[in-house]
Image (cartoon, coloured by chain):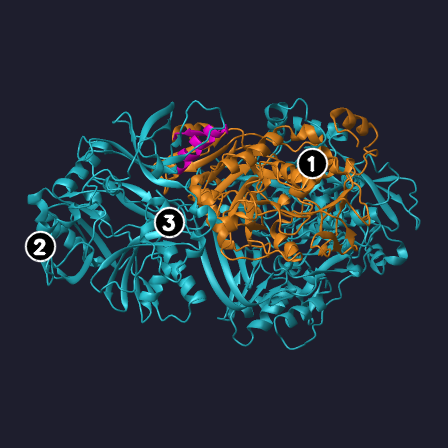
Amino acid sequence: MAQPCRLPAGGRIDRAKPLRLRFNGRDIEAYAGDSVAAALLANGVRLVGRSFKYHRPRGILSHGSDEPNALLQVDRGPGRIDPNNRATVVEAADGIAVSSQNHWPSLEHDLGAVNDLLSPVLPAGFYYKTFMWPQSFWQRVYEPKIRAAAGLGVAPHEADADRYVHRHAHCAVLVVGGGPAGLAAALAASDDGARVILADEQPEFGGTLLHDLHATIDGAPAGDWRAQALATLAARANVTLLPRTTAFGYYNHNHIALVERVGDHRARQDDRRPRERLWQVRARQVVLATGAHERPLVFADNDRPGIMLAESVRVFINRYAVAPGRRIVFATSGASAYAAAADAKAAGLDVTLVDIRAEAECGPGPAMLRARGIDVLPAHTIVGSTGRKAVTGLIVAPVDANGIVGPRRTLACDGVGMSGGWTPAVHLFSQSRGKLRYDDAIDAFVPGTPAQAERSAGAARGIYDLAACLADGWAAGGGAARDFAATPSPTGFRPVRALPTDADAKRVKAFVDFQNDVTAKDIALAVREGFESVEHVKRYTTTGMATDQGKTSNMAALGLVAEILDRPVPQVGTTTFRPPYTPVTFGTIVGSARGALFDPIRVAPLHDWAAAHGARFENVGLWRRAWHFPRPGEDMHAAVRRECRAVRESVGIFDASTLGKIEVVGRDAAEFLHRIYINAWLKLEPGRCRYGVMLKEDGFIFDDGVVARMAPDRFHVTTTTGGAARVLAHMEDYLQTEWPDLEVFLTSVSEQWAVIALQGPRARDVLAPLVEGIDLAAASFPHMAVRTGTICGVPTRLFRVSFTGELGYEINVPADYARAVWEALWARGQEFGITPYGTEAMHVLRAERGFIIVGQETDGTVTPDDVGLGGMIARAKADFVGKRSLARPDMLKPDRKQLVGLLADAPDLVLEEGAQIVADPHQPIPMTMLGHVTSSYWSDACGRAIALALVSGGRARMGQTLHVTTPTGFAPARVAAPVFFDPKGERVHG
Amino acid sequence: MRHFSLRTLLTEAANAHQGWARQWRAPEPKPAYDAIIVGGGGHGLATAYYMAQEHGMRNIAVLEKGWIGGGNTGRNTTIIRSNYLYDESAAIYDHAVKLWEGLSQALNYNVMYSARGVLMLAHNQHDVQSFKRHVYANRLNGVDNEWLTPEQAKAFCPPLNISPDIRYPVLGGALQRRGGVARHDAVAWGYARGADALGVDIIQNCEVTGIVRGSDGAVTGVETTKGPIRTPRIGVVAAGHTSVIMAMAGVRMPLESFPLQALVSEPVKPVFPCVLMSNAVHAYISQSDKGELVIGAGTDQYVSYSQQGGLHITTHTLDAICELFPQFSRLRLLRNWGGIVDVTPDRSPIIGRTPVPGLFVNCGWGTGGFKATPGSGHVFAWTVAKGEPHPINAPFTLDRFRTGRLIDEAAAAAVAH
């Protein structure tokens, strides 16, 4: 018979929409509106998983996101398989295949269950006490076995086929939770047109109203009130309703992160629709109406499939029209289970209720149930259960006021609903850094003083009565005080820890944390061993650290610790709640930042030209830069040699647009640069350029670049490619915090100016016909000068500078015109064999001249003097950033690492960049290292390989032979001056 | 101290584990000790253990304002390696690795040191140069570290995506095979148990509120929430709150404190065999024995004592993880937390004497302190016991920020972790 446990009528499922899913290869019929858990129960499936440690058979404990047991792999097709889904949260959808996890060879027959038999030697923390001998076995034998046994589901092996999106929103009030309190809060908050977002993790709003069939609100059935409230909210344009949306993180400044499940509940993934959407909301006010979680009772074998939470039994019956059993025993220490028992009886099930409390404590509940023909056993404890893969009976015994346990009897049953009270869901409140307060009356932590603009409402702060919840929610939403009339909710509850038992409590398994298999005796063991802080207990036993993050177990564990230590609960404390409230898909957090959008690639305006001309590119920070331009048949080495030759012999063209550019303007611009750089700026004439070096406060080189004075109050500063952003931030930092009196304005113009470097003896010949308004003659436009004019009719800042050692220009033009100017230069240069060159040739050319690259010759530990630039320091300056640090004793030592040239004895040996240098390659390890190779290339101009290196006391070692590491040993090399070509630097003046 | 072994475990199993004693006592403070360690994290507990074990100082106490191991010891991603660039760093971190290798046996507490290898990925030419510099320097220092091609990296770490088409293709990697992970809580507990057995008083929920000094300026004791305690020697090992403690003695520390985040996924069956780090895209990842992917994120940009970082930091890290491992996109974030790291100007620790006689400090481990725990405790124990630094921590003075003799691993390597 299909769906043998489906009740003939009732529920919120849509019987007109049947659907079919698969569980472990078996067809499961269900209806739209079912959760996977409801569908499984409707089909009589009780056993749905195996526990983490002991591989105990497990069923469905709850009906919501607190579920610790029923974790399934869900398969929605290729690239859409994922593990560890809670069956109580996944909506039944046509065609999905779900399967159980963590067993071998099968769910029914799992060899891992041997751990259950071995459990006497596997108490909490057993692994800290053994697996230590022999030493090598931990990693080779024990750990691999433990790893294979642990770990729940199987990680996907294919890339995720789904897509995820992000939304950001602001609102006046964000209401988290759409139960009675949340609905009332949203109604009140949106009444005057304020923007309100109402989010609830379930597919439908209403919370308990979805399964409380008998309550009335303001004289009408609660279900009608719910429908009316939703209709009102939906009709308000200022209200955004987000069902299936879990608020999982509460960050600073009322920044709330929520995940909306958009796609998974649909039968077939609509390809245009994302799977999930991350909402990041900034709310002026947050209302947390997140409800409460029911607590299991702690007794021996309380984990058998079929034993679930009492309220969950009620939800399955009323909301899903599923009978979780035909003979159900409710076991409770409080009043709420009485309503569940009555509803079960009304659904035609055989019901018994066992209450730990004495008859006198139970209030009107027992009479109410007995009137319905239900057997009620007050003053009874539960000492165990029978069955293996499904519960077959609950073993109870009378218990008197002194805790004396009487004779046992077994109540035959196929379902148990247990209730150990309620725990307010204070997770988000705690995340917001609000202080929790322990409420003795309900034996739970409730929100105390908020840390942000937040109010908790309803069951989330321990208010369980329906009318009180509504009034509380209404007030939290900012409504003027008003009363609601509603059916009184049953009240009364006695906190219990481990239930009294006649068995040896030291030897039974009474579970506290179901998923991680933590029992009451594990908690006791931890405390016995000195783990008294609740954080210690948690870490030693792993209680509360499973995928449910202890929603059903934390209070039980805490209560047990308090009981054993005989201390009040607040003195034991509570653990800090961390985001996320429920697990969140990585992909949802990543959103669209995948592939090309992971870190968007920055390209210069001439990138397409380079690509069309065969460039190979390299990543430099976020940039993609032309590395070299190989011709057909050329390798990198040949291409770079050719490019270098062209620059030395005729003319090369290079895209230098990635250089950072900062326009420094204002009355005090010169004074500002004077303090930022090590060298002097006050007397630089407009129209002239100067190479500048800047330090950080620690005295080490931070960045360098050419600076041009365009006008008395205007400088065009260039930085390294990688330094653009941090130099601007560095400058702003000093300007705003150290020298706010200076009148200077900083503007990044890196992307406004494209820079075309034209370098080589024929550079002027190529340039001349295209430039107007600038006299290019060497006498009137010397090296290290800047002019403004036009090129190809485009305004330009034309720099005469050189990073190659040749006559050269850097042509700054507005980025949009870069391609046109480049093409004109390219056409004009054809007769001179103009050659595009990339970053590698640029590196070689500058190394031949001994020019440093910040980040290659320097590494944050290098002073100007170390790289031979000590002479640039304007000694007369009163101060500049880093000046004081340069006077520290260690900065003046003669054995500092200094920049030198290095020529391998084998002229064609290109040393490895990063190779270490020693004086004696035969010394014992650890060796004394003198320095390392910073740059190393084949140089055609020198006819040999060249290298730059930082070597301890290097300038005093000229001519010495040192030894440089190679992949196979050492190579001898001679220390030389760090200039290999045109030592007097005459070619730039050509 | 009850010996831990399979035999005692079996014996106790027969006894329903009723015979296990406290792993460390819960004493009230005595009026005076020969030395006091402020801070019951891994470093502080290790210090106390080695002071008692190697220097015979049994009349000492560890004062912890909360519960032991509750700070960064219990919040880090447990990565252990020693392939640092500079001689000084390589020496101290390798000293630690050597102690890690036998630590479970030394403490008779399984700290689960798992030398599964730490692989650091190079994604650009600068990384390649920097990593080779490390590999060569480590080789000459006797520290294992080897350069791998992308194919070799993939063979070592099969889930790795070495496609040339990803945003930052893998150009190679540096592998330290002796690197790995350990169980962080067990390190604190193991040292606590070992120290306690040697007579050390471990006093929890005891916050130091003042440092008392005599007329000559030397320390004479501490004020605490459990009353005053006399002592001639104080070792401060308080990580992110070191500045606060040292200020009680009038010493300003060159430290900045930042929130650093980490996260774990839901547990899955073994899928990740090693530790993998990528500084260019900022991701590091391993898999715990329980099955969770353990992922390190970055620090917030601003200083703070709030143990909660921004979501954007986590986001950026997960972006990088899913770029390198697109198959992990459907896994779920289970827990995300923060700790406060204390960072020095050169990103290397400060271990040694202070201008105040009798006051010693061990701090500034930044984002990488866990791996150093045994070595740090070992040399600091020497320092406090003898009143002068062990040769290994001699370079890590507070004074170096005055002399300029920095040990700047972050600058040198662009590897700050």
The Cα–Cα distance between marks 1 and 2, rounded to whole angstroms, is: 76 Å
Helix, strand or loop: magenta stretch: helix
The structure residue drawn at horizontal position 84% and vertical position 30%, both measured from the top left corner, is: B15
Chain of residue at mark 3: A
Q: Residues within 10 Å of mark 1 (few under 14, many from 20)?
A: many
Residue A85 is situated, as x and y percent measured from the top left of the image, at 57, 43
Asked whether A963 or A627 is in front, the reply is: A963
The residue stretch that appears in magenta: B130-149
Chain of residue at mark 1: B
- Name the amino acid type tagged 2: Ala
Residue B377 is situated, as x and y percent measured from the top left of the image, at 65, 39
The structure residue drawn at horizontal position 7% and vertical position 55%, both measured from the top left corner, is: A769
Residue A709 visible, this orientation: yes
Q: Which mark is residue A597?
A: 3
Residue A342 lies in what quarter of the image? Answer: bottom right
- Name the amino acid type tagged 1: Tyr
